[in-house]
Amino acid sequence: MGTIRVTDLGKAYKQYPSRWSRLAEWLIPFSPVRHRQHWVLQDVNFEIAPGEAVGIVGVNGAGKSTLLKMITGTTQPTCGQIQLEGRVAALLELGMGFHADFTGRQNAFMAGQLLGMSIKEIEALMPEIERFAEIGEAIDHHVRTYSSGMQMRLAFSVATARRPDILIVDEALSVGDAYFQHKSFERIRSFRKAGTTLLIVSHDRSAIQSICDSAILLENGRMAMYDKPEAVMDYYNAILAEREGQTVRQEQLADGQVRTISGTGEAGILRVRLLNEQERPIDAAEVGQPVVLEVQVEIRQDIERLVLGFMIKDRLGQPMYGINTHRLDQALTELKAGEQITYRFAFIMGLGKGNYSVALSLSRLDSHLDRNFEWRDYGLVFHVINNRREDFVGCAWLDAKTDIVRTAAQVVPETAP
């Protein structure tokens, strides 16, 4: 089983004011230090248990790829320790280790040997590598003729030809087509069920939340957060929306969930309620029941344009449905401080039974990344029960109507001999 332990890990690069300073430091005996340390990672500590999956998120330059390179040994740390137990397979930079003038098959053999496989083992696995990569006759063409997607297909197929104890995946999967991404994540999920330890870098919220047990947020080369995937992704999205004068805070709710609230505060959410047909607040709705989501908003400073949006998410944080008043062509303009606005969204509860939460956004345009007045996760938590409809499976009730036509078998008369 695979285990990853990272203790006080740090990586720094030497920065020189000029190339002559670099040369002088190298060549002149007892020369004073002419460089300064530029730390790209500092004080990183975590442990991943066997069979656990951890996602790493952060903006470009946060140190995600550097961390993975140190864990896999392609870059040496400046300080700290990394302990790995188990066989490791890594898919980092696209086509890393591939030679453009060799064929895909030749590169597969070389990459397999780098992963510790013997020639006989690679030969035995080659049919499965070809089948999974689905690049056809291109397997015997030079890699320089490959598209980025073809390189990723082959690299992933080789790296996962046998189940590793530890699988480390960088953002290389993002270049593939939707079909192969789905296929790759299905293989990753099957490895997880079999006990593989997973460390993955991805900007795909749904991938992180559906695969990972926990997530690490890197910010300015340090661990800013290590928590459940949904809490980390909510905080990460709030950071992305951060603007001058904007605040980001987190609150722990009574059920242990972490709510993230961010925004400039020029407008704020006062109250959120789910109402039944009698206009009474409810925290549980029946499948197929008419409901109203009511949101009260307060204007604290003059605003030229206001858009309210909401997103219903399941218990894993996967989006079920989202809409905003920009897309409904109902944005409000020229709002004055002191105004209060009540929004009412009426709909039939078409979700499957389970627990759901509502995230809310007040912004200027379609996205909360443009003038985020307030972003609030867990603005409302509610339950969906099913006591009146058919016992269906899934997250959406489609109220399918069934029409069955049964035709009697035709009797063929016997012919006389």
Image: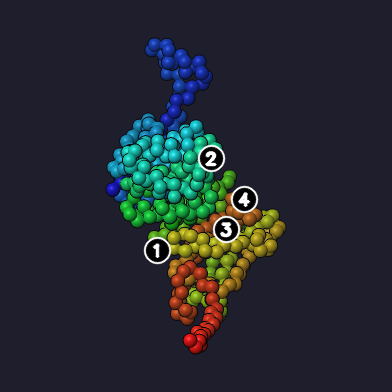
Identity, as a three-letter code, of the amino acid under mark 1: Asp
From the viewer's perspective, is the residue at label 1 or at label 2 nearer? 2
Identity, as a three-letter code, of the amino acid under mark 3: Ser
Residue at point 52%, 58% (across, down): 376
Between disc 3 and disc 1, whose residue precedes?
1
Between disc 1 and disc 2, whose residue precedes?
2
- Alpha carbons under labels 2 and 4: distance apart: 38 Å
Front one among 68 and 278: 68
Provide the residue designation for mark 3. 361
Question: Left or right: where does residue 86 sit relative to residue 411?
Answer: left
Q: Position of residue 221 (x, y in %)?
A: 44, 38
Vertically, is 74 above or below 400?
above
Q: Are marks 3 and 4 in contact (CB under 8 Å)?
A: no
Between disc 2 and disc 3, whose residue precedes?
2
Q: Position of residue 205 (x, y in %)?
A: 49, 53
Between disc 1 and disc 4, whose residue precedes?
1
Provide the residue designation for mark 2. 146
Q: Quadrant of residue 272?
A: bottom right
Q: Position of residue 285 (x, y in %)?
A: 49, 75
Q: Residue furthest right?
A: 334
Q: Is residue 337 visible?
A: no
Identity, as a three-letter code, of the amino acid under mark 4: Asp
Identity, as a three-letter code, of the amino acid under mark 2: Tyr
Provide the residue designation for mark 4. 370
Q: Is residue 331 visible?
A: yes
Question: Left or right: where does residue 96 sit relative to residue 196?
Answer: right
Q: Residue furthest top?
A: 29
Q: Are marks 1 and 4 in contact (CB under 8 Å)?
A: no
Residue at point 44%, 67% (across, down): 355
Between disc 3 and disc 4, whose residue precedes?
3
- Alpha carbons under labels 2 and 3: distance apart: 43 Å
Q: Secondary structure at mark 1?
A: loop
